[in-house]
Image (cartoon, rainbow, N blue to C red):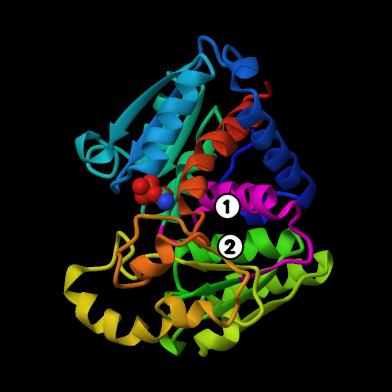
Amino acid sequence: MKHFLSLANLSSKEMHMLINKGIAIKKNPSRFSSKLKGKTLILLFDEPSLRTRISFEAGMLQLGGHAITYHLSESTVGKKESPKDFSQVLSRYVDIIMARLYSSEMLAEIARNSRVPVINGMTSAEHPCQVLSDLMTICEKRGKLKGLKLAYVGDGLNNTTHSLLYGCSKSGVDVSIGCPKQMMPDSKVLAKAKEFAKIHGSKVHVTASASEAVSGSDIIYTDSWMSYHVPHNQEKSRHKILMPYQVNKQLMKHAPKALFMHCLPAKRGAEVTDGVIDSKASIVYDQAENRLHAQKALLLWLMKK
Ligand code: CP
């Protein structure tokens, strides 16, 4: 059974195939409009979502299938039954599962016990659907991946950073992380990304200096300083630590030709200023749109269509 839980498990060839397929679907969506006729996707959420939920729901409908959204707050899992029983039962009703869960362990347990493919719709550790779509967006805008430099600045210890480390290192994109020392990426993820980089001819660099990280980059990327699981009472202290990593016009000057990316939702005035997110360099809405196309490619691949 093929699942999509982490970009670390995807080969570079598979990643490029999915990106190219996403681009082909975007160009001619009607060619794929009945590929998943009669199929059902379930979307499990224990955290909020705009992009992930709506792009998967709309994508499945546009492929001729059906999508059910199920919030874990109204479910039995973790309360009256184990993830094992939950998954064994659920996977007899549907053809594919997408889960946005805080816990990677629970996601892995659901995948282990599922009769159908399981997609990671984001955990606290990884966000592979986001980064697959981001690589497709970069390919569209720059015509290639290999040889580019992507700089990520801000909270380095988050799911998007981890998936960027895997996705970039495997596709030959140099990745440079600028983050505070107390918000460095997970050391195991970093070590794995460095191994992938060696194989695929890219570089991985981490620094506490935002200007050093972005210098000469083709893409500057940031994410929320308040990921869904961070308690609200930490907002003030995190903003103080992270303000030197804000993407503003001054920081963009270190990479005058760079595109700006953000997986959204964005807090304007925190991790990015209006002047950058609304500038010509910003491709954040294309990024959000491509969730739809890249995930359609993913659904078709996992369902062997
Ligand atoms: N980027 C992203 O995953 O957005 P949502 O949280 O709205 O799904």
Would residue 28 be found to the left or right of residue 264 on screen? right
Q: Residue at x 30, y 59 (%)?
A: 228
Q: Quadrant of the N terminus?
A: top right
Under circle 2, the secondary element is helix
Q: Is residue 300 magenta?
A: no
Please identify, in this view, whether the residue under mark 2 or under mark 1 is nearer the observer: 1
**Mark 1 surroundings: few (<14), some (14-19) or many (≥20) residues within 10 A:** many
Q: Residue at x 39, y 78 (%)?
A: 246
First to last magenta residue range: 124-150
On residue 164, the disc is 2
Task: Kindly identify the residue that appears in the image at 65 percent across and 57 percent down.
Answer: 8
Alpha-carbon distance for marks 2 and 1?
A: 9 Å
Question: Callout 1: helix, strand or loop?
Answer: helix
Asked if residue 166 lies left or right of residue 154, the reply is right
The spot of residue 214 in percent (x, y) is: 58, 79
Which mark, residue 49?
none
The number of numbered discs placed on residues in the rendered structure image is 2
Q: Is residue 170 left or right of residue 57?
A: right
Q: Is residue 228 left or right of residue 217?
A: left
Most foreground residue, 74 or 158: 158
Q: Amino acid at mark 2?
A: Leu
Q: Is residue 141 magenta?
A: yes
For disc 1, the marked residue is 134
Could you tell me if the residues under marks 2 and 1 are in contact, i.e. CB atoms within 8 Å?
A: yes
Identity of the residue drawn at 52% across and 90% down: 209
